[in-house]
Amino acid sequence: GKILLVNVDGVINNQKDKTFSGSTVGLGMVEKIRSIVEKAEKDEEIKALLIKMNSPGGTVTASDIIFHLLKTYKENRKVRIYIQVMDLAASGGYYIALAGDEIIAHPTSLIGSIGVIALKVNLQELMTKVGVSWEIVKSGDKKDFMSPFRPLTKEERVLFQETIDRYYDRFVDLVVLNRDGLNVKEVRALADGRVYNAHQALNNHLVDSIGYLKELIE
């Protein structure tokens, strides 16, 4: 049978396809993986997917879509998925790696950063210093909660934190469901956002082994 090699390299997002003069010259990460999986489903000679993972993560939704595409393909076609972590499988990169039957780290890999982050820039003081003012017309008092021209209110911060916590709980649950030997309490202890080297990740059951790509292919 065949081994299909798939590269997940770079930031994971759901950006639109890149086009030039009306022709597609590059696919966004989600559509790239979707295209590969759709072709793989038609090839009965494929017996395994080997995914080279090198990603710092990306958006929650893009990571979840790719995880779902791989998991569904694996279950439908009874094909094993092996994840070879190269430099990095962090945040959304590790999220996707959870679709693998085995996760193999390179000896110098960094793994983890289990968690969720959202950033909001507050330029209010800067705009005041340079003499710029702004006016906002909105349909509701929280419609501009991500505006860079004001800080979050206490209520907005609580609501925003609740949303982040729900995404975080989903991430933790996926680790528990897809990694043998880890319970919720253990995963939460590991999932404080830090990254682990290959040996730490192995000792904490985040990966299955440490090795090189050539050995894995053999």
Image: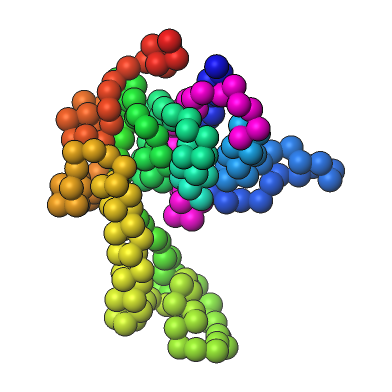
Span shown in magenta: 41-64
Quarter holding the C terminus is top left
Look at the picture and state if 71 lies above or below 85: below
At x 57%, y 45%, the residue is 30
Look at the picture and state if 61 lies above or below 72: below
Residue 201 in view (yes/no): yes
Query: Depth check: 101 or 27 in front?
Result: 101
In the image, is residue 36 part of the stretch drawn in magenta?
A: no
Number of numbered discs: 0
Q: How is the image coloured?
A: rainbow
What x and y, as percent, mark residue 107? 29, 20
What x and y, as percent, mark residue 167? 36, 60
What x and y, as percent, mark residue 66? 50, 45
What x and y, as percent, mark residue 122? 41, 69
Left or right of residue 214: residue 17: right
Query: Depth check: 126 or 97 in front?
Result: 97
Query: Depth check: 159 or 135 in front?
Result: 159
Quarter holding the N terminus is top right
Name which quarter of the figure residue 84 lies in.
top left
Residue 197 in view (yes/no): no
In the image, is residue 62 part of the stretch drawn in magenta?
A: yes
At x 33%, y 49%, the residue is 174
At x 48%, y 37%, the residue is 74
Outermost residue toward the right in this view: 21
Left or right of residue 93: residue 9: right
